Image (cartoon, coloured by chain):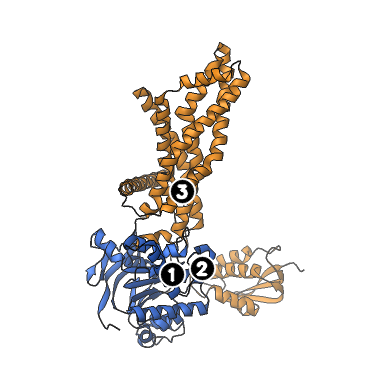
Chain colours: A blue, B orange
């Protein structure tokens, strides 16, 4: 891959809803071409961190830097143009239900490019082919299955050839085989497009299969316990909680 | 079926032996474990509680529930509980129930709020809602500016769909309601005005009432229930499904995309519906008037035409536009403020309708006062 070139840097991030603290002092670096996993137990603020990274929720303190440029302290127009380099797959797909799949994918193209209608449709068809949904251009989201919705959501996320793809729990609600296929797809896209990928998940199988960098959020201490390659964290991290999580609650507590 | 019994014996000072017998099944009559709990409070306290379940028949949650109460009582008084006399299943369930300690602060404490505190909280909530509505209105005004300058992004097809839903599809209900309202007005007019021999002025009453006030208000209320509710539910569901977030992450304004086209659909369709409603009301009134009064259609029609001034017509149409904006505003604002559950969608739909109707009636009163002062 492109090597160790920092693409996204999270610096001193603190997230809170009103007075309710979610996570504090988060610091991590994501290199270009990384598959970065945001992991941790249920309710630790994984999805909130994702929302901060994609510009949906502002952090209480700290900032996220894309290519060295701060996101939250920049002006709205710069934020908008930064967002255009993101593609996001939401947990349930979040396809716009009043539009066909082709229209879902085409909306961003119509908005941000000068392509004509026919070209947009061609691009949409191509994106659907990439995710294995060739021929489904004219289906509405409620006419396809949950796994297909996720893949269609991925096709929409890739509409503008983003530099960074964000995934919120990609394998949630999928059977193991569909989940595996989605993982393979994520890796394939990373390889062929050179995209940086950020994934929120707690599926261990996915974490080890696709991740090469990660941050581990702890709901008790409300901060990150570890960051780095999940495979190494599993075997060598000094913190018991981290190893225990990655070994499915079967780690031996050396302190005990 | 054996009746469940519980008896307490104290063979020596240190041991409180609880004997259980019979079938301890939930829903059957179970003995009160209060006797054991009371004994645990008294001094001299026993050191341990033991159980004897030789005679115990079938058991289920009914038994474990009582054991948990005893366990809590024992723990609170520093008394040890020896569960070895219990059936193995019950021992394991007890152990499982107490395996994870209650998380500190997890239990919710419901305390009664004082009257003042409650009033204060409601006032604060009301202020917060008002601020939200004001912010939303501001965003909407900016967005309308972009819409008119053709800088807003939205689906043209969506817009036409909204026009159809708020216009053509509302025709039957608007026809029916306005027609009947016209008839009711005419009945009242005929009854009362005939007392003075002024029955023909029923035509004026119906026409002026429908065109100036009633048609716009009735259409507004119908649209609040029909379209305002639909807007709140559509946008609220999109919110729950993260579809609104998906728009935002693409760098698009959700208000441009979702709200403004809906508002403009109502701005365009409401006056047309209100005008149509007035005509239906006048027709309804004419049927009653001609049937009950000694007038011809021509007389009634010319009386109607003479009574209606252009000012009344434009005043009524302007009101209908205001109501349309308010209905769309209430529906869309509630939809955008919707929480993250199915329950929240229902609540925001209800609120949208209530808010829409309240806004219509309040603005109707204000506009009427303004019109009177302007001499319209």
Which chain is home to disc 1?
Answer: A
Specify whether residue B55 is in view.
yes
- Check residue A125 in the rendering and tell me which mark sits there, or answer none: 1
Of the image marks 3 and 2, the number of the one nearer the N terminus: 2
Label 3 sits on a secondary structure element that is: helix
Q: Where residue B44 sits in the image (x, y, percent)?
A: 56, 69
Do we see residue B48 in this rendering? Answer: no
Q: Is residue B327 above or below residue B73?
A: above
Q: Tag 1, which secondary structure?
A: helix
The image's mark for residue B76 is 2
Seen as rendered, the residue at the extreme top is B197
- Mark 3 or 2: the one toward you: 3
Chain letter of mark 2 equals B
Left or right of B124: which side holds B237? Answer: right
Q: Is residue A140 left or right of residue B53?
A: left
Nearest the viewer among B86 and A166 is A166
Q: Residue at x 59, y 65 (%)?
A: B37
Tell me if residue B6 comes above or below residue B144 in the rendering.
below
**Residue marked by disc 3:** B162
Q: Nearer the viewer, residue B47 or B76?
A: B76
Crowdedness near tag 2: few (<14), some (14–19) or many (≥20) residues, C-alpha within 10 Å = few
Percent position (x, y) of residue B91? 61, 77
């Amino acid at each position: 891959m492109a090597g160790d070139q920092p693409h996204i840097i999270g610096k001193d991030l603190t997230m809170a809803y009103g007075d309710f603290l979610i996570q504090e002092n988060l610091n991590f670096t994501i290199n270009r071409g990384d598959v970065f996993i945001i992991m941790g137990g249920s309710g630790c603020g994984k999805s909130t961190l994702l929302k901060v990274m994609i510009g949906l929720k502002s952090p209480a303190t700290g900032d996220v830097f894309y290519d060295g440029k701060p996101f939250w302290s920049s002006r709205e127009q710069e934020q908008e143009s930064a967002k255009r380099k993101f593609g996001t797959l939401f947990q349930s797909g979040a396809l716009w239900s009043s539009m066909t799949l082709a229209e879902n994918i085409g909306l961003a193209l119509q908005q941000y490019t000068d392509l004509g209608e026919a070209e947009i449709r061609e691009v949409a068809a191509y994106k659907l082919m990439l995710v294995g949904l060739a021929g489904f251009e004219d289906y509405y989201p409620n006419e396809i299955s949950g796994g297909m919705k996720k893949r269609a959501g991925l096709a929409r996320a890739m509409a503008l050839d983003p530099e960074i793809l964000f995934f919120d729990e990609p394998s949630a609600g999928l059977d193991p085989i569909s989940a595996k296929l989605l993982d393979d797809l994520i890796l394939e896209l990373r390889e062929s497009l050179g995209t940086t990928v950020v994934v929120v998940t707690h599926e261990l199988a996915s974490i080890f299969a696709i991740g090469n960098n990660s941050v581990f959020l702890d709901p008790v201490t409300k901060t990150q316990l570890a960051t780095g390659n999940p495979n190494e964290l599993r075997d060598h991290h000094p913190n018991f909680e981290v190893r225990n999580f990655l070994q499915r609650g079967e780690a031996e507590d050396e302190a005990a | 079926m054996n009746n469940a019994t519980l008896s307490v014996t104290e063979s020596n000072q240190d041991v409180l032996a609880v004997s259980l017998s019979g079938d301890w099944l939930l829903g059957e009559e179970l003995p009160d474990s209060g006797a054991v709990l009371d004994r645990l409070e008294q001094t001299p306290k026993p050191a341990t509680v033991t159980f004897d379940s030789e005679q115990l028949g079938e058991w289920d949650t009914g038994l474990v529930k009582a054991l948990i109460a005893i366990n809590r009582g024992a723990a609170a008084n520093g008394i040890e509980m020896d569960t070895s006399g219990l059936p193995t299943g019950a021992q394991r369930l007890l152990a499982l129930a107490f395996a994870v300690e209650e998380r500190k602060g997890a239990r919710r404490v419901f305390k009664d709020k004082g009257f003042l505190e409650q009033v204060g909280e409601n006032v604060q909530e009301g202020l917060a809602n008002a601020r939200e509505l004001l912010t939303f209105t501001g965003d909407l005004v900016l967005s309308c500016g972009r819409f008119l300058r053709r800088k807003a992004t939205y689906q043209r097809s969506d817009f036409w769909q909204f026009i159809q839903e708020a216009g053509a599809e509302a025709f039957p209900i608007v026809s029916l309601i306005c027609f009947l309202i016209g008839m009711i007005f005419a009945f009242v007019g005929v009854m009362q005005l005939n007392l003075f021999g002024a029955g023909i002025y029923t035509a004026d009453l119906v026409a002026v009432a429908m065109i100036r006030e009633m048609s716009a208000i009735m259409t507004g209320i119908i649209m609040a229930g029909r379209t305002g509710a639909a807007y709140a539910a559509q946008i609220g569901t999109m919110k729950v499904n993260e579809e609104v977030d998906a728009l935002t992450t693409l760098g698009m304004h959700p208000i441009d995309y979702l709200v403004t086209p809906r508002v403009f659909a109502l701005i365009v369709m409401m006056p047309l519906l209100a005008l149509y409603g007035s005509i239906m009301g006048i027709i309804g009134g004419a049927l009653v008037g001609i049937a009950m009064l000694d007038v011809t259609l021509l007389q009634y029609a010319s009386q109607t035409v003479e009574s209606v001034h252009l000012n009344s017509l434009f005043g009524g149409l302007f009101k209908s536009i205001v109501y349309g904006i308010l209905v769309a505003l209430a529906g869309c604002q509630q939809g955008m403020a919707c929480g993250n559950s199915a329950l929240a969608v229902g609540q925001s739909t209800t609120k949208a309708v209530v808010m829409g109707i309240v806004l219509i009636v309040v603005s109707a009163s204000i506009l009427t006062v303004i019109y009177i002062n302007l001499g319209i």
